[in-house]
Amino acid sequence: GRHEQYYQTKESYLRALDLYEQAAALDPKFERAHIGVASICCVYYREYSKDPKWLKRAEASLAKAEGIAGETSRTLYIRGMIEWLKGNDETAIATLTRSAELDPKYPNAFNVLGAIHLENGNYLAAAEAFQRVVELVEDTMSYFNLLKALDSAAESERLMQVAQKALPVFDRYLLREPDDLNAIVTRGYVLLWAGRDAEAAESAASLLERDDLSGLTLSRLGCLYLGLEKPQLFITLLRKAIDHGFREIEQTRNWSLGTKDPAIEREFKIILSELEALIKL
């Protein structure tokens, strides 16, 4: 289930959910299976659906985990994520801070803290939280989050240094998981941040015509093309991402287009309005 969750596609999330539920059925007192269910419900709500039923399902699984182990760093991490997704940022930050204090070596609380700070434009605070994660878990997702925060904070020198350090981590991971298309896209970002623009463009082009990219992967590929100064491709891929179920409206609102083309700006605002209408439906 954790392996499937790492792929970050709509289908892999649902497969992970099924596996976590099987684990919980085999051993109803296995706290981490219930935590897994709650975690999946939260990320699925954030990225692919805004139906409140997913948060209710997360809360039900959280209650089962708390009934087994009481209040732990893991249950507080889930509670903090739920509060964040409900729009209660202050409560979320306080809850996640308690989670980190209970277990300073548990990376998930720092991950969500970083995401909250990033969404609110507190880029240096986001980078600090993601740096803690990288120190605990040196994997592709941790590095990508840290690099995204450093890029947003315009920490160009540190960005390049961390990107160069991250590339071998991505390369080793993709040797094991060559079909993880989301990781291939994020490696393209890392190449761009490391100053290897031509290789980043080549990596992006290798994915552009594929028809098996998830909504999240399509949106990230579009953002990569923004970095490559091709905003029209960003618009095209964002529309395609939404057609494939992408619903991460909060993060999308904060994207900086980096272009002065009024036509692109207008089209982006239209897409945002369409996405908001889809979510309301």
Image (tube, rainbow, N blue to C red):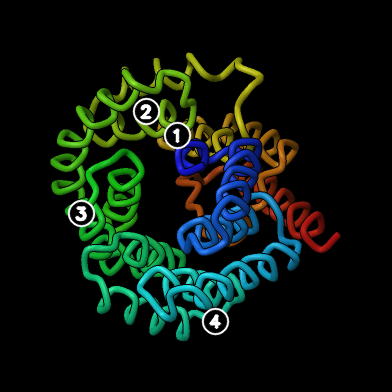
Q: Position of residue 65 (x, y in %)?
A: 51, 70
Q: Secondary structure at mark 1?
A: helix
Give the CA separation, mark 4 to mark 3: 27 Å
Residue that numbered label 1 is attached to: 224
Amino acid beneath label 3: Leu
Relative placement, left or right, of 227 versus 84 is left
Q: Give above or below for 236 relative to 92.
A: above
Q: Are marks 2 and 1 in contact (CB under 8 Å)?
A: yes
Q: Nearest to the eye among marks 2 and 4: give it.
A: 4
Amino acid beneath label 2: Gly
Amino acid beneath label 1: Leu
Q: Residue at x 28, y 51 (%)?
A: 146
Residue that numbered label 3 is attached to: 136
Residue that numbered label 4 is attached to: 88
Residue that numbered label 2 is attached to: 188
Q: Earlier in the sequence, mark 2 or mark 1?
A: 2
